Structure formats: C-alpha cells, structure tokens
Amino acid sequence: MKKALVLFLTCMLLLTACSSGTKEAEKEKEPAASGGTTSTQEAGDKEITIWAWDPNFNIAALNVAKEAYNAKHPDVKINIVEYAQADIIQKLNTGLNSGTTKGLPNIVLIEDYRAQGFLQSYPDSFTDLTGKIKPEDFADYKIGPTSLNGKQYGVPFDSGVAGLYVRKDYIEQAGYKLDDLKDLDWKQYIEIGKKVKEKTGKDMITLDPNDLGILRMMIQSAGSWYLKDDGKTPDLKDNAALKKAFELYKEMMDANIVKVNADWSQFIAAINNGDVATVPTGNWITPSVKAEAAQSGKWAILPMPKLPDTNGSVHATNLGGSSWYVMNIPGSETAADFMAQTFGSDVDMYQTLLTKVGALGTLKAASQGEAYAKADEFFGGQQIVTDFAKWTSEIPKVNYGISTYAIEDILVVEVQNYLGGKNIDQVLSDAQSQAEAQIK
Amino acid sequence: MRADKQGVSIRAKNAFTGWSFILVAVLMIIAFYFYPMLEALILSFKTGTGANLSFTGWSNYERLLTDKTFLTALTNTSIYLIIQVPIMIVLALFISVLLNDNTLKFKGFFRTAIFLPCVTSLVAYSVVFKYLFGINGLVNTMLMKLSIISAPIEWITDPFWAKITIIIAITWRWTGYNMIFYLSALQNIDNSIYEAARIDGASSVTQFFKITIPMLKPIILFTSITSTIGTLQLFDEVLNITKGGPGNATLSISQYIYNLSFKYTADFGYAATVSYSIVLLIVVLSILQFKVAGEK
C-alpha cells in the first residue's frame, strides 16, 4: 500500500515537474515567440507558399506568374513547392483533419475531379474569392467544380481540354488521309483502328486497365457523368452514355487494337516509341509527345471522336484539369491578391505562359492574341492552341461531385467482369448498387 | 522496528529508481500507441467526409459486412497469406539449414546475399520488380530467350499473374529476414545432439525432421506470426507494383484503407473501421497459431 502511494506520489511529482517545466519554458519563450510571430506575421502577410505538381507545366506556369507579380509587388516573397499530386492530397487531408493549419500552403492546386470533395469536406478552410475574380471570365465548365453554394473558391486554370493526337504517317500507310479522321465517332475510330493494325501492325491506342480516363472523356462529351446533376446520386444503371462507352471499350479490346500499359511511364514510352497510331487525351500531353524530337512533323491533333447514337455528344471533352485554391490561413489576403492579379486576370501573362510553357489556361479573354495563333512545327505547322481554345469553349458542363475516384474503382472491377462476358445491364446495375452503398 | 523501517525506505528507493527509468517510456507509449488506438476506435464509430464527422453508431461496421471491395481485399490478402507465408517459412528453413552446414564454403557471402533484400527500401525494390516483370521486362525477355514461353506473360496486367508477381516479390524481400532467425536458433542447438543421432544411425533427413524442426518450433511459431502480421499489413509492394489492379485483383486491406483515406474523398471513420478489422484478424490468427503450435 505504502509502495503504491510512494509510486503514485513520485509519478505526480514527475508529471507536475514536467508540465510546470514546459509551462515555464513556454513563458520564457513567449516574449521571444510572440515577437517572432509578429515579425513572421508581418513577413507572413508578404510571404506566401504554393503547392503544385508537374514541373514542366504547373510549376513552370507558377514561375511565370511569380515573375509577373513580383514586377509589381517586389516586397512579396513567393515560395513554390513541388509535390506529387498524391502527396498534396495526403498532406491536405491530414493537415486539415488535424485541425492545425501549421504547415499548410497559402495556395494549392487541386484537380477538378477532387475539388468538390475538398470544398465540401473541409468547410471554411478555403477562401471565398467571389469579388476578387469574376467566374464569368472563365470557361463555363470550370465553374461547377470550383464553386460551392454560389461562392467562387477556385481560380480556374488548366483546361484539361482533350484532343486526338494522331501519327499521320501510320494513318497514311493504312490508306487514310488526315481529313478522314476529323469529326469521327468512336465506332468509326475502331474501324480505322482495325485497318491501321492490319496495314502497319501498330496498335490504334494504348490504355491502362486501371485508369478509366477514356470512359470519362467519352461520357463528358455527351454532358453525362457518373453522378446525376446534384453531384450525389450515382447515375450508372440507366446512363445511356456510360453504357455506350462501356460497349465501345469492349469493342476496342476485342478488336485487338489496344496496347495495354501498366503506368504513366509505359504510356509515355508507347507514344514515344511509335507503338501507337493515336492518343486521345488531355492537352497536357503535348510536352511529352514533343519530347521525342525525331517524330517532329509526324503528329497532328484532331478533334475528339464523339459517342455514336448519343444525343448531345460533341467533339470536345476534358480530362483532368485543375484549378488554384487559396487557403484560409494567415496570408490569405496576399495569396488572393496574387491569384486575382495573375491567373485571375492577367491576359499578357497568359500569352507568356503559352510561349514559354505551352500552358493553356481557361481565362476567356486570354484566348485571343498572337501566342494563340502561333503555328507549331512539331505538329506540321498546325495552330494547335487555337484549336484547343476552340474545343475548350465547347466542352459540356457536368457536375463531378465528390466521388469520382471511389466510383471509378467500382467501375474498374466491373469493366473487367464485362470484358469477361458479364451482361452489360447487369454490370451497370451492380455498379449502381455498390456505388449507392459506398456513397452515403 | 528501526531495521524494518529502513528496509521499506530502501525498497521504496529502489522502486522509485526503477519506475523513474521506465516512466518516460511508459508515458511515450501511452501517448503515441494507446491514445491513438483509442482515438481510432472512437473514430470508427463516426461517419462523414473529411472533417464533417458525426457519430453514427455501428453503421461503419454494418457497411463493412456488405462491402464488396473489402471482401475482395480480404480474399486477396488471405490468398497471399495462405500461399506465401508457408512457402517463405519452408524456404527460409531450408536455406538456413544449408547455410548452417560447417563444410560449406563462402558461408558469409551466401548469408549476406540472402539477407540483403531485407535491407533494401520497400518502394525501391517494388519499382525495380515492376520493371523486371513488365511486359517487355527482363523476366519475360529471359523466359522467351530460353524458349520456356512463346508469348510474353502479362505479369502486371493479368489478374492471376499479378498476384503471382506480388507473391514472388514479397518472398524475395522477406525470406532472408526469417532465415536469420532460424540461423541463430540453429546455432543454439548443441552439436552433440546431432552427434548422438548420427551414432544411432539417423539419416540427415530424419535428423532434420526429428531434431531440427522440434528444436526450432518456438522460432517457427514466432516467424509465422510476424510474417502473418506483415502480410496483413502488406501495402508498399501492391501500391507500387500493380496499384491494386487490374480491377482490384491484387488490392490489399492496407491499400484499401489508404484509398478510403486519400484516394477517394476522405472517409477516415470508415478507414478506421477497416483498420480495426486487421487488428481483429491478427488477434484471431495469432491465437490460432499458438493453438496449432501447442504453446500457451
């Protein structure tokens, strides 16, 4: 008994010693610390940190913006930090959940598919930019993902507009002209693919079975998505566009015109090695295609094929665009001002972005100008930016909601089942019930 | 009376010294182990996205029972467990007995070579394996050159072969780790026991099954439990080699937890629930293994 008492007292003593020690230490530190905070806060107001991924595209664009802003506001220090997209998501989620804003950036790049997830999951964590930028200045389809309850949170950036990258030489070897591939539907695309395979031995397309980007592009071109307009109700079972997309996917696989890849590097390798005749994907692939200088002049970019027999399907769609978000932490004023003055309105800066980085934004006013009309020798002198800008304005608006990737993981499995012979209606209705159980 | 009092104070002094030594560690363990475990348990009763969490009782556990993806992850993990752990244990046992042979030359070299995989970074080796087993990778090229196969095997993109690839990878990585335990245990077996057996005319196979295995039983139990726990927590390999694909064919439970937390819109409550299912599995499997091995 006595022993226990002694033990208890010692513990108490040690604990109080510890805690009072820290308290005293804190007290001692306080004047210095608060002095430090004020000085960093003063500096903090004038110092902002930005997180983004992709050094060739987003980081390069940020550097252009930084230069433009610093020319007018030399007192503001801008730190640009590069992380992989997955790391940013992880850091944001853990940071915002822990309730401490320490270590979070002032501005962060978020993919449009994920934006609503963040805006709805962490209310008040992002700064309302209504009044700082005008939503109507940007491409319409970007406003859905970047706003919530009528408030504009994101500064729309990367358009993610998609096009059909085509190897002219392969197409010609198969007996087609480039014009034959303009304004196709996917059914015709597959037919051409078979011919190309027969004549050249090259596959028409390369796909990663774990990434359903092609399905996303197909259904968005018809103004359809995995979810209904409310962004919550799964729309898989009776989704005509999705059903068509599934059927076309299987047709491609069955036609043996697909080179399967397992990841990004194999995807890029298939393009640069000349293994495939076409690449339907987002315009952000341009730098990677151009990386193989020996193929200069062999490529062209055509409008995306549309869905056959589907109402409202157009030759324009989007894949994985992203936008900037200002976080509600000290320094948000400066950060918001930086965004408003650069990506939010600076038409000249967008011209520099194009010439220097090749990055296409979604600010409507910026889509005129010399840089936009420039011919690209790699693509046989095609005015690719003018084309992309035109398609950008045609992209149907959809509500991505908060569950794109959760639903896609369900679909990835069902696609495999479907390829294995399961009935399409059963596939979609199973996916529907799973999605309903998943999203609550 | 006086002597007794003195005794108490010495004992108290000893206790004070003892406890003060471990107190810091105990407090740390409580703060960084038990407190998070408790918090996770509480979290598993909450539902919602991101920071909008609210108590919903057993709903996460009910969802777990009807969750097809969880079932797939559980099945995959069980397949790894049932196939890979026995293969690895037997292999490690076999190699360690070979390496324990006194007549073997370059023992140090072989031991290092087999142990080396265990100190490589999980991510680094996974990435290397991914390229080795790629469709145009070294493995396919070699098998084709040796005319063992006529067309390249889709190691990563075929549901069956992807599982095999994962099993090969974890076997490569962890066999040496278990081997070290067996080797050190083997060195503790008195050589005279083998000598006596040899005099009695026992063949080396009999010696292996009648002496080595029974003597190593506690170590075999230990390695099988740690390997089971390791397999249930399998994450890096799957994420880096196959990303859980094709179509969740290689998805592990840990990766599903990661997906729920970070790939999808964050649902930390349900992710905590799935984590607790691993805790439960480890407890049940460990008890089973103790029972099978006949230890208390």
Image: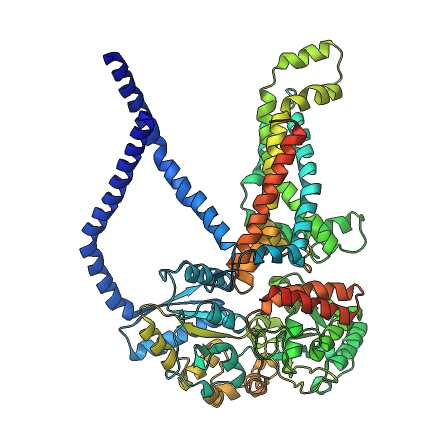
Name the residue rendered at 69%, 37% in the picture: B86
Residue closer to the observer: B222 or A10 = A10
Instruction: Please give left or right for residue A179 compared with residue A86 in the image.
Output: right
Name the residue rendered at 35%, 73% in the picture: A335
The color scheme shown is: rainbow
Q: In which quarter of the image is the N terminus of chain A?
A: top left
Number of numbered labels in the structure image: 0
Q: Position of residue A172 (x, y in %)?
A: 74, 80
| Residue B199 visible in this rendered orientation of the protein | yes
Q: Quadrant of the C terminus of chain A?
A: bottom right
Q: Position of residue B280 (x, y in %)?
A: 59, 44
| Corner quadrant of residue B175 | top right
Q: Position of residue A364 (x, y in %)?
A: 48, 88
Residue A71, placed above or below residue B93: below
| Corner quadrant of residue A435 | bottom right
Instruction: Please give left or right for residue A185 compared with residue A141 in the image.
Output: right
Residue closer to the observer: A225 or B58 = B58
| Residue A201 visible in this rendered orientation of the protein | no
Name the residue rendered at 77%, 71% in the picture: A424
Q: Position of residue A354 (x, y in %)?
A: 48, 80
Name the residue rendered at 52%, 62% in the picture: B266
